[in-house]
Image: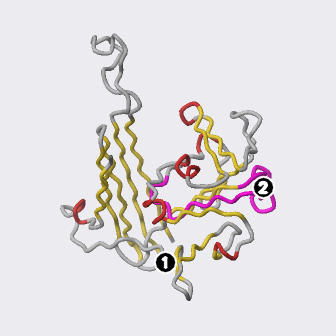
Amino acid sequence: MSITFKVTALSLAIASVMSSSVVSQANAQEVTNDESGLEVIMVTSRKAVESIQDVPLAISAFSAEDIAKRSIEELEDVAMSTPGLSFEDYSNGGYGTPIIRGASQFSVDQLEQNVSTFVDGVYIPRNYALDLGAMDMERIEVVKGPQGALYGANSFMGAINYITSKADLGGLTGEVGLVVGDGGRRDITGNISVPIIEDKLAFKFNFTNSDYDGDWTNSHPAAQAGVSPGTDDSLGGWVVGTKRPTAFL
């Protein structure tokens, strides 16, 4: 069972570099409350900021808070929480195939997809690059059904929109997260947003590192024999690190 710790004081990570109070980013533009106090998610699936309740489309949207609560780390996790969407990451990421409402491609390696994927409105034309993870995402939207008029020919059965979090123009903000679990699971994530020109230009840096020893004991007879190449470690583990700088005007 994994234990999750959330650290919102960035000074723990950068106290030796600078001394400043740090606050967590808010997603005010993404989640609001209506007159009854109910949460309303704002989406951009039709190229404009609208309430998800006012859009005449079948949309599943995940805010930054949803992503954290559901422990969404990759597109497969999004699919597990989205009715009508399935995702298979064939060949260790080489042929990622999102499928909406059962309409799959003829072949997993064909360039033409039935579901198109976008990052901040920019189309991703290769299926090996569409599983971006969920690091510092403001929102992930899954639009279901034919969307050729808005998203082009490769959105015959729908589209997936990644909306990244923007740098904060108003002040210094940041966040650090730590996940510790069994099997040697250790995840460290964080971001820092630094204003360069107040209300005009800011820089943001995101990082993540995930380390896991594996799920299954290596039962091969030669696993403990010191054979090279070989390993006596568990199987199914990983070591992944990602860094992403962004600027926001």
The numbered dot on residue 179 is none
For label 2, the residue is: 152
Q: Is residue 24 left or right of residue 120?
A: left
Residue 46 in the image, given as x and y percentages of width and height? 71, 69
Residue 245 in the image, given as x and y percentages of width and height? 44, 57
Q: Report the colour scheme.
A: secondary structure
Residue 109 in the image, given as x and y percentages of width and height? 69, 33
Q: Amino acid at mark 1?
A: Ala
Residue 223 versus residue 72 in the image, above or below: above
Q: Amino acid at mark 2?
A: Gly
Residue 18 versus residue 237 in the image, above or below: below
Q: Residue furthest bottom?
A: 35
- Rendered image quadrant of residue 141: bottom right
Nearest to the eye among marks 2 and 1: give it.
Answer: 1
Q: Is residue 149 magenta?
A: yes
Give the camera-side residue of 165 and 177: 177
Residue under the point 35% across and 54% down:
189
Residue under the point 44% across and 75% down:
169
Q: Which residues are magenta?
A: 134-158
For label 1, the residue is: 28
Residue under the point 28% across and 11% down:
225
Residue 249 in the image, given as x and y percentages of width and height? 51, 71
Q: Is residue 227 left or right of residue 120?
A: left
Residue under the point 29% across and 72% down:
22
* Nearest to N terminus: mark 2 or mark 1: 1
Q: Secondary structure at mark 2?
A: loop
